[in-house]
């Protein structure tokens, strides 16, 4: 069995290396033409074209206009892996989160798995393009549309300033809060007004006071996006935007309730009305499957990648990603690979790093690590079962 696994990996590795220049060309085309979430028509088009050229069965605009599904081995009865790619950019900083690299890492891993299937691995491969990770929740909608119902596990990688297999992210809920009062002349007839700005300020300050009773892993951040018209007019309407995050999914509802009470109390105290609208696309925290993480770390380590201890990795809490929702329905891996230890996410310097030769070389290593991880799980029924058993318990505990 070990010899057979080694043979599959031997088949996969040179295929990824052989396509490295083509993958780099794809990456740079996407990097040079950044597109915001749900507007990634160029990236969607060239990625779909490439998959078709490589012999995949491609469904364009798969449940969303800029999503895709590329399948190989559909006739096989073995387990199914979904390898995910992202390709949306950020406003102002383009590919300041390196999604051009995520795109080709998914493609590269898929090419290697395809080679193993052609060599006799009894498995089904789905390469899935997932749009609008940057705030749009593309994967959340794809989960709701049933895109992962026939998938056994799902994997992806993300460029970063560090290497990490045991990824920790936060559940996320977003709210828009609108206070409405009554306008009046602020000097001549202030008693005739009801100050919506007072409500907004009180809500903001109440949440600041709440922080003393918040757990260390809880996060609340917000802005007053609309504060009035002129100083001599009692503000009739104000608007806030707040985000609520927790590492544990179950705790997000608890924190959300506390924050909601602050919004409502401020309205009562100022005799204003309040409309609280929570985003219908919440993000779950990522449940990293340890079986997948250890395998990824093993294969990346064989290619020279150095990782901190698991404890150190899990002490680094990232922001939020819609992959969290995927990891709540199938076992998942969202590994991170270092492209430059000095650059922060969502910055111009990260964008520059994402276009370098070094970043591309590290992406090929990540793609191979992802590919070999998938092959080992697809090849070993007992490992697949252990992975699923862990997943079921993790969902209960999340």
Image (cartoon, helix red, strand yellow):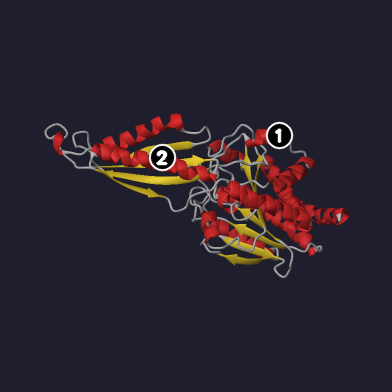
In the shown orientation, is residue 164 left or right of residue 186? Answer: right
In the shown orientation, is residue 43 left or right of residue 370? Answer: left
In the shown orientation, is residue 66 left or right of residue 224? Answer: right
Q: Residue at x 73, y 46 (%)?
A: 296
Label 1 to label 2: alpha-carbon separation: 35 Å
- Residue 374 visible somewhere in the drawing: no
Contact? badges 1 and 2 (CB < 8 Å):
no
Q: Which mark is residue 258?
A: 2
Find residue 241 and report its horizontal and vertical position in percent.
Answer: 38, 42
Label 2 CA crowd tier, 10 Å (few <14, some 14–19, many 20+): few
* Of residues 237 and 328, the one drawn nearer to the viewer in this rendering: 328
Secondary structure found at label 2 = helix
Label 1 CA crowd tier, 10 Å (few <14, some 14–19, many 20+): few
Q: How many marks?
A: 2
Tell me the quadrant of the picture where the N terminus can be found.
bottom right
Tell me which numbered mark, 1 or 2, is placed earlier along the sequence.
2
Kindly identify which residue carries mark 1.
Answer: 309
Find residue 170 and report its horizontal and vertical position in percent.
Answer: 54, 42
1 or 2: mark nearer the eye: 2
- Residue 46 visible somewhere in the drawing: yes
């Amino acid at each position: 069995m070990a010899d057979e696994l080694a043979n599959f990996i031997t088949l996969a590795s040179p295929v990824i290396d052989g396509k490295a220049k083509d993958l780099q060309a794809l990456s740079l085309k996407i990097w040079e033409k950044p597109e915001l979430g749900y507007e990634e028509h160029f990236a969607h088009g060239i990625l779909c074209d490439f998959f078709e050229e490589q012999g995949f069965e491609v469904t364009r605009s798969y449940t969303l206009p800029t999503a895709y599904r590329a399948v190989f081995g559909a006739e096989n009865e073995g387990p199914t892996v979904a390898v995910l790619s992202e390709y949306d950019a950020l406003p102002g900083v383009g590919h300041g989160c390196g999604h051009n690299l995520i795109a080709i890492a998914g493609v590269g891993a898929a090419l290697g798995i395809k080679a193993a299937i052609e060599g006799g691995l009894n498995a089904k491969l789905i390469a899935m393009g997932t749009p609008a990770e940057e705030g749009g929740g593309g994967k959340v909608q794809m989960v709701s549309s049933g895109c992962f119902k026939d998938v056994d596990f799902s994997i992806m990688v993300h460029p970063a300033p560090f290497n990490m297999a045991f990824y920790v992210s936060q559940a996320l809920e977003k709210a828009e809060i609108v206070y409405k009062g009554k306008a009046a002349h602020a000097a001549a007839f202030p008693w005739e007004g009801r100050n919506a700005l007072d409500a907004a300020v009180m809500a903001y300050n109440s949440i600041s006071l709440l922080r003393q009773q918040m757990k260390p892993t809880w996060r609340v951040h917000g802005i007053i996006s609309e504060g009035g018209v002129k100083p001599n007019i009692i503000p009739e309407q104000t608007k806030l935007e707040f985000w609520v995050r927790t590492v544990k999914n179950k705790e997000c509802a608890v924190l959300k309730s506390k924050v909601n009470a602050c919004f409502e109390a401020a309205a009562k105290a100022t005799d204003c009305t309040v409309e609280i609208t929570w985003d219908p696309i919440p993000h779950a925290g990522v449940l990293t499957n340890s079986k997948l993480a250890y395998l990824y770390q093993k294969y990346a380590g064989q290619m020279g990648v150095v990782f901190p201890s698991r404890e150190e990795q899990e002490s680094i809490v990232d922001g939020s990603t819609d992959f969290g929702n995927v990891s709540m329905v199938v076992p998942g891996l969202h590994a991170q690979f270092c492209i430059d230890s000095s650059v922060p996410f969502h910055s111009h310097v990260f964008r520059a790093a994402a276009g370098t030769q070094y970043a591309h070389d590290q992406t090929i290593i990540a793609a191979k690590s992802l590919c070999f991880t998938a092959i080992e799980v697809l090849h070993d029924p007992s490992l697949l079962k252990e992975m699923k058993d862990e997943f079921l318990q993790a969902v209960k505990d999340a």
